[in-house]
Structure formats: structure tokens, C-alpha cells
Amino acid sequence: MNYSEYPYYTNQGWINPKNPASRFTFLEDSYQGSGGYATGAYLIPNKREKQVDFEVRKMRSRIINHFKPIVDGMVTPIFRGSPTREFGNEDITMSQAEAVAMFLSDCDGSGTSFEDFMKKCARSSRKYDSTFVLIDNKAITGYLTEADLQERNNLPYLVNITPDRIVEVSMDEAGNVRDIQWITYEIVEDVGKVPVDVFWSATHWRKEVKGEIIEQAENELGFVPVFPLYPCDNEDYTTDPMPYGLSFSLASIQYNLFNLASAINQIAEDQAYSILCFPGEAAELTLGTNNALVGYGKDGNEPKFISPDAGQLDTLYDKLFTGMVNEMYSTASMNHLRTFQQSADSKRLDNERTYEVLIDFREQIATLDKKLIASLGLYLGVDLEYSVSYPHNFGIKNLEQDIEVFGALQGTAPTEVISEIVKRIKNASLTGNSPEKMEALDLIIDNYYKLLNTEPVAEEQVAVEDEEPTN
């Protein structure tokens, strides 16, 4: 019998995030710090904890969100600069070229540029371990109406289908979607917003409301215009098109951190205070921070305070909590997001791992980018010759790069620039020194390069200035 089967746990409003039905809600809550983190429902009640005590602990709970900066840290560097796009068609018509330009500036009918849309998809992929993108020019998804499409001259639009809305999806061994069902919403007159099931296959598409087909048609494309985006190459599309990946592991660590932080707070707030012990006749034993323990010792002994051992708190925080935070960033290869002392070799290895993660994801994004533009060409009736390159300079510096730049700039760059590079090399190399010593080294570096930048006074000029004036 597991925790979720105990009546005690189910009655206390505890949410089990490992329930597959709660998986994507749990990932979204982990990113936003919302849901069970905001209400305390992600706390696991202790077996001997009373309901009222658990409610107080839920009220005291707070989340220190490490999941969001890690997810953003895996996306933002790739979009630090704009990708380079090149179209090589010479036979493209003016109207087709204008359609491509309009699509790049507004790809979803809401004014979102193609670049911003790709960034949103990348964040969804990192957050949920996968995401899917539909390209279509029909009003079958509940996002654009027929009037909207006519205003866009039936230009295709994109929809990011996040995994939390997907009911079922199957893929072939090449990673192409064979069929997919997801839930969207439409406004129905006299009813309001209703859920609609959308089905796509290589031969047809249809929409259903409560199992009743309300619209269907043949798929003239001959393939499903839905494309996946994974943080890294999915090795088994056919059996697991929406795999449990790194993000779920990271969110699970944050879930444990949330519960551990609550335990630490409970000990600190309820148990870590001194208790006044007053000798005398034994009385009803009531412990707390605003009363005394009476009947402790013999009459005539002086009152004194007793305190719990601080070792338990130290162990929970210094070894367990801090260790789990370190594990979270190390697992994600995102140690550069934190400030801590490490050797130059360790920092270099961390940065290499980070680059590998970012480069892999950058290639996945570029592949999706090219598939979407190729599909756009099909809708426009032109085979677009297209290439794209996303930035490879992620803004993550390492010691070797600084040394290379230092060598190249010697004698050509302003001395303040050289000084800053030398400081970075010094900080990466001389770990373990006191802050005072590091500041002293900075001062020495600044003074040295100021001296190099000072124009020396000619000896003849000095001799003349030292002479006494003659009358």
C-alpha cells in the first residue's frame, strides 16, 4: 500500500505529483511556483500530524524556485541573438515573397513574430520535456475564425500544442506524427466556451464535441502538419512520443526541496526555541515557546532553560537541502547560473557540458524551424530554398576563451579592457583566497595597467624642469 492509498493522506488534501494524470500540471506548477506549491498541497503530511497542524504548515510553506531559472537558462542563450535566415529562391513571385514576410512577422494571427514563437515553443519543450506545433490555414483549431483567415488571405498560422492538451499521439520511426488528438476550446452561441476534440491523420481531420462529429474533411496535404520539438533527440518516437525527461527529474528534486524546506521551517519555528524549566511539583506537561515546563528537577534547584540540539537543523540544511540544490543544477548542466568557488578545470568542464546541452537543443530548434518553413512553402505553392542558423555564442565564458582574447588584444585594446580580462583569469585560477586578498590583487592589476597607460616623461624634459630658472 502506498501513501496515496492511505485514507489519512487522501483526506488531507495532499496532491500526489507522480500521478500520471497530474504530470503536466505538476511541471507547470513547478515552473510558475503555483498550484500545490502556492496552496501547500504538494506537502506530504507526516503520519502523526494532526489536520490542524498540517494546515498551519501548509500556510507557512514557501517555494524557492530553482526549476524556472534552469528552464530559462536552457532557452534564453539560444535566442540571445536573432537567427540568420536565407532564402535562395529566384523564381518566387512577389505575392509569395510578401506572404513569407508576413508569416515571419505574424505567424499565429496574434502578432507574434516567428522568432518569438519559436522561443515560446522552446520554453514549452524544456518545461514539459516535449511540445508539438501545428501549421494550418483552416479554422478548425478554435484559434482563428474564417474572418481572421480571410483577413490574412488564408496565410497559414502556427499553434503550439502543449502536451497537457494532448489526449493521444502516435509517431513513426522517423519521428513524423501519424495521428494526433488534442483538446481545444471554442465559443458556442448560447453555450459559451466548450471543449472540442480535434483529430488529425494523414487522410482526414475532424472535430468532435462530447463524441459527436461537428465538422470533418479530407486532409489534402497527405501528412499530419504537426511537428514535435524535443530538448534532445528522442531515441524512441514510436513507444514514447511524450517521454519523461530531464524536466520531470528536476521538478521532482524541487518537489523534495519544497518538502524538506517545510520540515526545516517546522523544526526552526516549533522546536528550536529554549524552554524554561521550573522546579516544583509536577504539572500538566505543556510545551511551547510561551509557557514553562514545570516539575523539572527537585525543589530548590534554580530555573534554567534547555535547548534542542542544533545538529538536526544543520544536517537538514547544510547537507541535505544545499546538496539537493547543487544536485539540481549539476543534473541540468547549469552550474554557471550559480555563484560558488570552483577550480578552473572544474569550471571548464561545467561550461563544456553546458555548451553540449545548448548546442543539441539549438539543432532541434533549427530542424523544427526548417520543417515549418518548408510546410509554409507547400501552402503557398512554392518549394522554398531555405536555411537558418541560430546563434552559437551563448554568452558563457570560460578561462581558455579569456586567455585567447587576452593574447589577441595585447597591445591593441584599451588597458581597462585588458585589465578586466586579466581579472577574470585571476578569479578563475586563484580560488580559495580570502576576499581581501582578491581585492588586493584587483587593485594591483588596475594600478599596473594604469602605469602602462601613462605616457613616460622624456629625460631631457625632466632635466630642464629640474633646473633653477636663470635671470
Image (tube, rainbow, N blue to C red):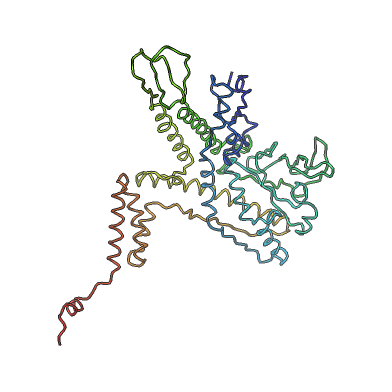
Residue 283 vs 54, above or below: the answer is above
Q: How many marks?
A: 0
x 54%, y 29%: residue: 57
- The residue furthest bottom is 471
Q: Which residue is nearer to you in this view: 330 or 83?
A: 330
User: How far from the left and from the top, in percent, is residue 389?
Assistant: 55, 57
Report the side of 189 relative to 59 (left or right).
right
- Residue 66 image position (x, y, % from top left): 51, 40
Residue 344 vs residue 72, the one in the foreground:
72
Could you tell me which residue is drawn at 35 percent across and 47 percent down?
A: 344
- Left or right for 245, reference 192: left
Pick the quarter of the image with the C terminus.
bottom left
Q: Quadrant of the N terminus?
A: top right
Observer-nearest of 420 and 246 = 420
Residue 30 or residue 226, whichever sits in front: 30
Please report the residue visible at 78 percent of the width from the left and 51 percent of the height from the top: 145
Going by the picture, which residue comes out furthest to the front? 300
Please state if 204 lies on the left or on the right of 399 as rendered.
right
Q: Where does the image place residue 340, in percent across and percent down from the top left?
A: 39, 43
> Is residue 19 depicted above or below 33 in this figure?
above
Q: Position of residue 245 (x, y in %)?
A: 56, 37
Query: Is 418 positioned to the left or the right of 84 in the image?
Result: left
Displayed quadrant of residue 214: top right
- Does residue 27 lie above or below 91 as drawn? above
